[in-house]
Image: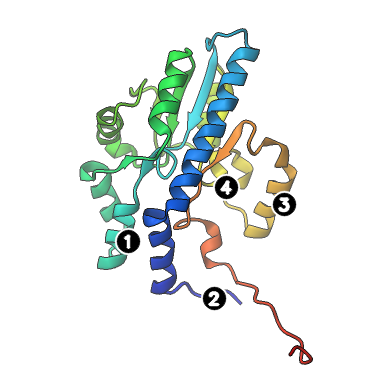
Amino acid sequence: MTQARTPHDHAMAIRYQQRSAEVKALQRQSYALATLRLKAAVDAAGGSGKGLAVVSDIDETILDNSAIMAHAMVHQGDNVETWKLWEREGDPHLIPGAADFFALADRLGVTIFYVSDRFDENKLATIATLSRLGLPQVCAAHVQLFGPPKAERRAAIEREHRIILQLGDTLHDFHGAFAGIGLDDQHKLTEHHADRFGEDWIVFPNAAHGTWMEAEIRPWTASATTR
């Protein structure tokens, strides 16, 4: 039986995502690993980033949106229109490590694609936000928002580039097979692709969003003889 998420559960998730030092440490750790993999891939390609690409999600991978999560929780306004307003008028900040990583990718000549399910109607606002925060290669062709599935957008990128690294906070940021499937199948696919995590797939922590949020928890059942 699925157990409903309570306001307390949501508050704890958002508090962890926004306020914990551990999340910031994990984010820095993810970018540190991504930097090592980026340098290694460029070195293996002869020291030039020409023809290579990094594909990254935006929200909770590059941008910290915990302020709108907290706003929605406090005001019980977690809806599409609230999120659209945040995309247009919000003031997210960069996740630790993002600025240095993308600046390095740019210096190495690697093409950067920002592939997100943000609303395409707010594309100019998203481009403005990424530009304001100093990220490189921010233009209409490189900022690809909601429309075709992410798998299709990645396939289009691969027609002209070799993707050497993907960054995201949910599993469908990496492979289309993860989209729209149940949690048990996600676990199986994660095992199947185990060799890619930490190699060319870099996963960022997000305690406030995911298909797992409505999953049944499995407590330990103590035996009658337990003292």
The quarter of the picture where the N terminus appears is bottom right
| Figure quadrant of residue 144 | top left
Q: Which residue bears the numbered disc 4? A: 179
Q: Residue 78: which numbered mark, if any?
A: 1
Mark 3, secondary structure of its residue: helix
Q: Residue at x 72, y 37 (%)?
A: 195
Instruction: Give the crowd class for mark 1: few <14, some 14-19, many >=20 residues within 10 Å.
Output: some
Residue 129 vertical placement versus 51 (above, below): below
> Mark 3 touching mark 2, by CB under 8 A?
no
Q: Secondary structure at mark 1?
A: loop
Q: Amino acid at mark 4?
A: Ala
Q: Secondary structure at mark 4?
A: loop
| Disc 3 target residue | 188
Tell me the amino acid under the disc marked 1: Asp
Marks 1 and 4, how far apart in space? 22 Å
Mark 3 belongs to which amino acid? Lys
Camera-near label (4 vs 2) is 2
Q: Residues within 10 Å of mark 2 (few under 14, many from 20)?
A: few
Where does label 2 land, which residue? 3
User: What residue is rendered at 49% in x and 16% in y?
Assistant: 110
How busy is the neighbourhood of tag 3: few (under 14 within 10 Å), some, or many (20 plus)?
few
| Percent x, y of residue 226 | 75, 88
